Image (spheres, rainbow, N blue to C red):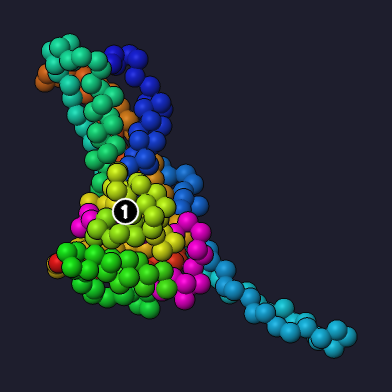
Amino acid sequence: MSINRFRPEIWSANLLVALRQNLIYSAFINRDYEGEIAEAGDTVRITSIGRPTISNYVPNSTVIVPEQVNDSQRTLVVDQSKYFAFAVDDVDQRQAKGNVIPQAMDEAAFATANVIDLYLSSFYTSIQQSNQLGAITVNSSTTPTDAYDKVLVPLKIRLDKANVLSQSRSVAISPDLHGCLLRDNRFIKVNESGTSEGLRNGVVGRAAGFDILLSNQTPTTGSDSVVIAGNDRAITFAEQISKVEAYRPQSSFSDAVKGLWLYGAKVVRPDSLASALVTVS
């Protein structure tokens, strides 16, 4: 890559695409209030409108008095700012097969996605109490069906009782819990699951109304792994690459790229998430 041919707008767009492809917990976010983000510390005001009362109507009798709609305001603060910076020596660039800068940019996006996933998963502490299952032990060797029966189904029930839309529900689980599902005949036997994906490729796909997402970034509390389920109405998220620059460091013969990432999130529907603290034994 020549510095003269570097186009910040194109690289910023490519980085955002690569990052969003690698995010797992984006299943629980929306970008409704992303707007214009220019600097760390920018804020987005979110106004929520209360639900009106539904009343009976009697023709020629009912006098309709409109109620005053209540509203509340939350503030989404873009308080997360992260950067990356790397250099490729001219000798390495010359000897490498192909252009290594785009590969390094992809790696930067992947690493940033991991950081953002950790940030998004930390919002499990804002889930309303009635949607928290608490501690659950799953025995992967003797009763692998526990993963479905004791975790996924109860999470679905909690969301159902909270009137959470059934469309676009997802659940993020750890590799250990994912392995339990792959020991459950209901997901690997073709005659029971209707597909050979579980047996051949280790893919569960959907279960209990959820898209099953495998993550190495599931939060932990003690020995428990936090399983988060819900939909994209729960958290609003805003991000932007503020700057991407290519330059020639004075201290070496190399091409270097640095970038600044700005983002922030806010839980706007704590009832649209549910959680379980799972120990896989």
Q: Position of residue 156 (x, y in %)?
A: 41, 69
Task: Say whether residue 277 is left or right of residue 30.
Answer: left
Whether residue 100 appears in this view of the structure is yes
The local secondary structure at tag 1 comes to: helix
Residue in the image at 38% along x and 78% along y: 130
Which residue occupies the foreground of this view, 84 or 195? Answer: 195
Task: Say whether residue 270 is left or right of residue 185.
Answer: right
Asked which quadrant contains residue 101, the reply is top left
- In reply to whether residue 163 is colored magenta, the answer given is yes
Q: Position of residue 83 (x, y in %)?
A: 25, 39
Q: Which residue is mark 1?
A: 188
Q: Position of residue 113 (x, y in %)?
A: 29, 44
Which residues lie in the magenta part?
158-179
Asked which quadrant contains residue 192, the reply is bottom left
The correct choice, above or below, for 108 with respect to 133 in the image is above
The correct choice, above or below, for 62 with respect to 156 in the image is below
The correct choice, above or below, for 116 with respect to 143 in the image is above
| Quadrant where the image shows the C terminus | bottom left
Which residue occupies the foreground of this view, 65 or 219? Answer: 219
Residue in the image at 19% along x and 64% along y: 140
| Quadrant where the image shows the N terminus | top left
